[in-house]
Image: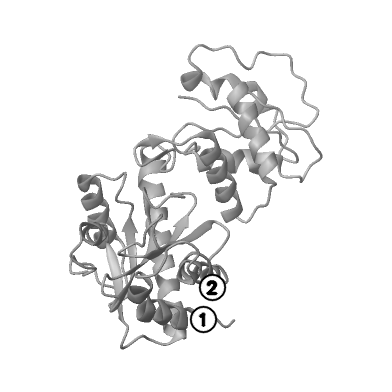
Amino acid sequence: MTTNLRNQFLHIMNNYIETRQQSFAGNPMGSVLRNEVPNEIRSLPFIHSIYTVTGSVGQGNWAIVPWVAIMNNAITTSTQRGYYIVYLFSEDMKKLYLTLAQGVTETTKEEMAAINLEIRSKIDMDPKVRKDDQIDLGPSKRARDYANSTAAYIQYSVDEMPSEAELVQDLEKMTSYYEEYIALKRQYDGVSSGVSPVAEEGGKLMNSRDVIEHVHSYITSKGFYYEKEEVTNFFLSLKTKPFAILSGISGTGKTKIVQWFAESVGATEENGQFALIPVRPDWSDGSDLLGYTDIKGEFKRSFDKCVEKSDQSSRASLFRFVG
């Protein structure tokens, strides 16, 4: 696969300052950063559909520090919050930085410093990746804010831009570090504490549309494919009444959509918020299954008879959010 990132980066760095003196609306430079560079990045084999790739030259006026961000949808779909990979161009256009950084708009300085420290201390990276506060984007407040949000970076120079192969290799490595940190946060914040690392974003509850996007992306990342409409219907069913029966022949993915849906929002067997109970396909036992006031404490015990009668050759699943 042939990409053109090197030439596009050099084109931006050699022409952006002059372009800023021109009209903003409809300028071709906007298309380069908003469309051409993101499209090149999306074409790379390790940039999967779980990522949103977007570039910016500003809103209504030229940005002093233009950028191109690569965001895992499970973490954030906005550069105002969360953590992500982002190419940052310095104000003087002499340097380009490939960074693992954070949104500065909805993240406090304390949260930012904590995440930077965690990434730097927990994720082993190639020696060429710098983990310090020496990134120099320029003197403006925006440039300094972006610099403060950066946990790790690789610096490039307009006079010594590496080869296309090296640029792609660096991005692939940074993507792996990004995913490693995401996995680490899921392990610590999801399994250990029982809280989904993406149930809240930037300290604010995600709205229904963002939850659906996150769940669908998470399931896709596990190698399973469901139409977004199916995920939406399941989500809305649970929102309407937290009890849903999925019908269909064996092997159509009923169990897996329940399992991955639960895991995507932090409900796992390890933290006691998810239970998968095997029963016979023709099970019609009339004994009570639900009705306990303390669902959290009695949920599994209420299924003892069902478990004793289970037939491992086939399974049905019952899913319930608790707590």
Residue at (29, 59) in percent of width and height: 119
In the rendered view, would you say 107 is above or below 243? below
Q: Label 2, secondary structure: give it.
A: helix
Left of 294 or right of it: where is 250? right
Q: Position of residue 33 (x, y in %)?
A: 46, 68
Number of residues whose C-alpha sits closer than 10 Å to that of mark 1, classed few (under 14), some (14–19) or many (20 or more): few
State whether residue 128 appears in this view: no
Residue drawn 29% across and 69% down?
153
Horizontal side of residue 258 vs 180, given as left or right? right
Report the side of 15 relative to 244 (left or right).
Answer: left
Viewer-nearest residue: 50 or 282: 50
Residues at marks 1 and 2, CA–CA distance in whole angstroms: 7 Å
Residue 66, percent across and down?
36, 65
Q: Residues within 10 Å of mark 2 (few under 14, many from 20)?
A: some
Secondary structure at badge 1 equals loop
Q: Position of residue 178 (x, y in %)?
A: 40, 61
Residue identifier under label 1: 4
Q: Earlier in the sequence, mark 1 or mark 2?
A: 1
| Residue on which disc 2 sits | 40
Amino acid marked by disc 2: Glu
Given residues 221 and 273, the one toward you in this image is 221
